[in-house]
Image (cartoon, rainbow, N blue to C red):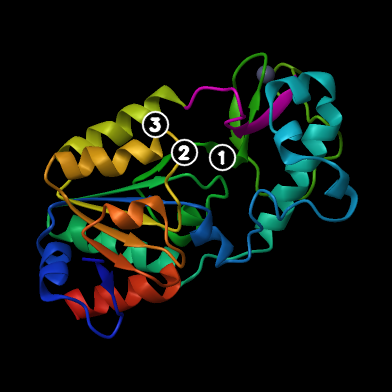
């Protein structure tokens, strides 16, 4: 049976799972950011950038070959992000985290998004699986700083401490995911009793294994996605909707 849920008709068992969960883990992806108007990776290729393949820009090799070009591309994406705001889906996740904490329970947000909109909304326990576009790191001394100001004067920007070259704090193709983030993710998954996959097709490793891990540990599972994904066939319930609509409606139905 296909576990599709209509937003006007949440199954009581699903709402029970939402209400009674002690350790919630939510995985978010590009769909959540897209609802705030953040262009997806490929959609960012407009204007001057249309002739570049993002797969060719988002690699350590590309940065080594042309640091100024790659730096400008990420800086423009950073500027675009600064013109966007968290949407009702982000805010609902903040509300849910607060509810969990108030009840002495936990809420872990795993995100594939690099835009820090979850932070901007007020989420606290966020694990950035793919790093952050808003944090730039010195390739010489390792110093990291969040950058929320205007476009950089020079590309690539230089480290104020040691003068070294700074790079965006995202995970590039061919790079390993940050070990600390993965550890935090798997630790949360071991304990979780409710797992949600939101706005991501969850086909890319390791996100693809998160759902299976959670389900194997006996967690209830919910998908929120506008499209059918491989996860749709595996989860307990699927909400075929925007996260900005589904999350607030689900929380209202569960918690009033
Ligand atoms: Zn430095």
Alpha carbon distance from label 1 to label 2 = 18 Å
Identify the mark nearer the N-term, 3 or 2. 3
Relative image position of residue 143 (x, y in whole percent): 60, 23
Highlighted range, magenta: 165-177
Q: Specify the label residue 204 is tagged with.
A: 2
Is label 1 within 8 A of ligand 1 (CB to nearest ligand atom)?
no
Compared to residue 22, the image places residue 7 above or below, namely: below
Relative image position of residue 93 (x, y in whole percent): 35, 62
Taking depth in this image into account, of 107 and 57 the one nearest to the observer is 57
Q: Is residue 112 rendered to the left or right of residue 212?
A: right
* Residue with the mark numbered 3: 181
Q: What element carries label 1?
A: strand
| Residue placed furthest toward the bottom | 8
Count of marks overlaid on the render: 3
Q: Is residue 62 rendered to the left or right of residue 211?
A: right
Foreground mark, 1 or 2? Answer: 2
Taking depth in this image into account, of 212 and 46 the one nearest to the observer is 212
Residue located 49% across and 60% down the image: 32
Q: Badge 1: few (under 14), some or many (20 or more) residues near its Cα, within 10 Å?
A: some
Residue located 38% across and 70% down the image: 240
Identify the mark nearer the N-term, 3 or 1. 1
Indicate yes or no whether the magenta region holds residue 99. Answer: no
């Amino acid at each position: 049976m296909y576990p599709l849920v209509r937003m006007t008709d949440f199954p009581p068992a699903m709402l029970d799972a939402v209400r009674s969960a002690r350790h919630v883990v939510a995985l978010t992806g590009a769909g959540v950011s897209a609802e705030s108007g953040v262009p997806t990776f490929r959609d960012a290729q407009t204007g001057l950038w249309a002739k570049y393949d993002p797969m060719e820009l988002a690699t350590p090799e590309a940065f080594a070959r042309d640091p100024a070009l790659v730096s400008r591309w990420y800086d423009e994406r950073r500027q675009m992000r600064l013109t966007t705001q968290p949407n009702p889906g982000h805010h609902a996740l903040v509300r849910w985290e607060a509810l969990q904490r108030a009840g002495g329970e936990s809420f872990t947000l795993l995100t594939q998004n690099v835009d820090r909109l979850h932070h901007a909304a007020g989420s606290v326990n966020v694990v950035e699986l793919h790093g952050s576009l808003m944090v730039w790191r010195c390739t010489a001394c390792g110093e990291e700083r969040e950058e929320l100001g205007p476009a950089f004067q020079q590309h690539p920007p230089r480290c104020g401490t040691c003068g070294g070259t700074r790079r965006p704090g995202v995970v590039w193709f061919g790079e390993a995911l940050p070990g600390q983030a993965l550890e935090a993710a798997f630790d949360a998954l071991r304990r979780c009793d409710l797992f949600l996959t939101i706005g991501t097709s969850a086909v890319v490793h390791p996100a693809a294994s998160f759902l299976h891990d959670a389900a194997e540990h006996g967690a209830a599972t919910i998908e929120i996605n506008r499209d059918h994904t491989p996860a749709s066939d595996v989860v307990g319930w699927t909400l075929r909707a925007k996260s900005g609509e589904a999350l607030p409606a689900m929380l209202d139905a569960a918690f009033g």
